[in-house]
Image: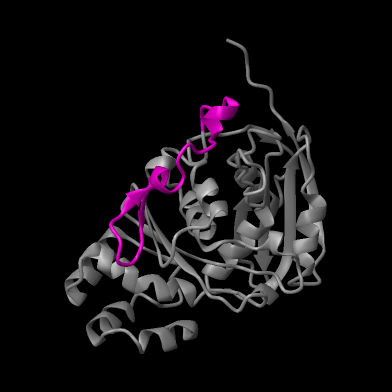
Amino acid sequence: MRERFTAVLERFPSSLQQALQPMLDNHFAGCFTPRQLLQLQQQSALDESSLLFALLPLAAAMSLAPVSGFHVGAIVKGDSGTVYLGTNIELPGKALCHAVHAEQNAISRAWLAGEQRLSDIWINASPCGHCRQFMNELVAGDAINIHLPGQASAPLHHYLPYGFSPADLGIKQPLLATRHIELSCDASHDAVIQQALFHASHSYAPYSQCYCAVVLQTRDGAIFGGRYAENAAFNPSMMPMQMALANLNGHNRALKEISRAVLLASSAGKISLQDVSAEALRAVTDVALEYVTATPVPTPSI
């Protein structure tokens, strides 16, 4: 069982402890399948919402908060029925714009897992404006049900009336929609660059066309990716480096284990994320950022 969950589990009812312990092994990746959720509900005698509120401290236990010291957890549910845990990530010594909010983290985990729509999110306090705007970028984002302790659930549009969305900028395929941007580069003999090319081709950058991704490799050869996720309000965009770092942390890996970092970006992008990605990386390791450009492949005309 993962050591960072030990103190949290000690505060859980014994029935929930016993149900969770075998699931929190070295393969736990911050999510629970529908089958696992059903098992947890049956053994704990909790309904789904009560169970997920109870599991929020597990998400918060994964927090990296050297700046605020405030540990936050969030849980989102995808249409597949799987739930994804997210937590806040802060980079030591870096400006707060480098931080990842727990809601963003959970949503990005679901996106990386292939979810195309989210139905619900559980958090301990009302989401900040940054996170409300980030959720509003998603497919049917304004209909996501927000669950707060002691309150009736309500959709996002209750918390963000008259929200500014991708549709206001003419975007018809919002974040989480199935999309693939064809990019090309020589990655035939490099598994890390191949993964970076895959994630960049599935990134979301309709405003800048800076389709890009970061892939981190650890000393034992494990690979963790992150994609750029832009936002109609621009500033709530999630950087690919932060998503990759959050992904690695969510798999119970220490940031000091990073041995290689690659940023792959479309050569047609209107902006560059090279400097901001390198700055974030320097906060956690001395490993230098490799930068690779890819060429957009024109879509054949019909």
Query: If the image is split into quadrants, where does the N terminus sit?
Result: bottom left
Residue situated in front as seen by the camera: 191 or 180: 180
- The reply to whether the magenta stretch includes residue 260 is no
Q: How many labels does the image show?
A: 0
Q: How is the image coloured?
A: one colour
- Residue 276 image position (x, y, % from top left): 78, 55
Query: Picture coordinates of residue 154 (x, y %)?
Result: 33, 50
Hey, which quadrant is residue 69 in on the image? bottom right
Residue in view at x 27 percent, y 83 percent: 18
Q: Which residue is drawn at 67% across and 75% down?
A: 67
- Residue 163 sits inside the magenta stretch: yes
The image quarter in which residue 231 lies:
top right
Q: Which residue is drawn at 58% across and 41% down?
A: 202
Percent position of residue 12, x then y: 31, 84
With 147 as the anchor, is 68 left or right in this view?
right
In this picture, residue 284 sits left or right of residue 165: right
Q: Is residue 275 visible to us here?
A: yes
Q: Quadrant location of residue 266? A: top right
Q: Is residue 246 shown above or below 116? A: below
Nearest to the observer: residue 53 or residue 246: 53
- Judge from the rendering whether residue 132 lies leftward or rightward of residue 84; answer left or right: right
Does residue 191 appear in this view?
A: no
Picture layout, residue 199 above or below residue 277? above
Pinpoint residue 238: horizontal percent, then vertical percent: 63, 51
Q: Quadrant of the C terminus?
A: top right
- Considering every residue shown, the one lying at the far top of the view is 302
The residue stretch that appears in magenta: 144-173
What residue is at 79 percent from the left and 44 percent from the top?
Answer: 272
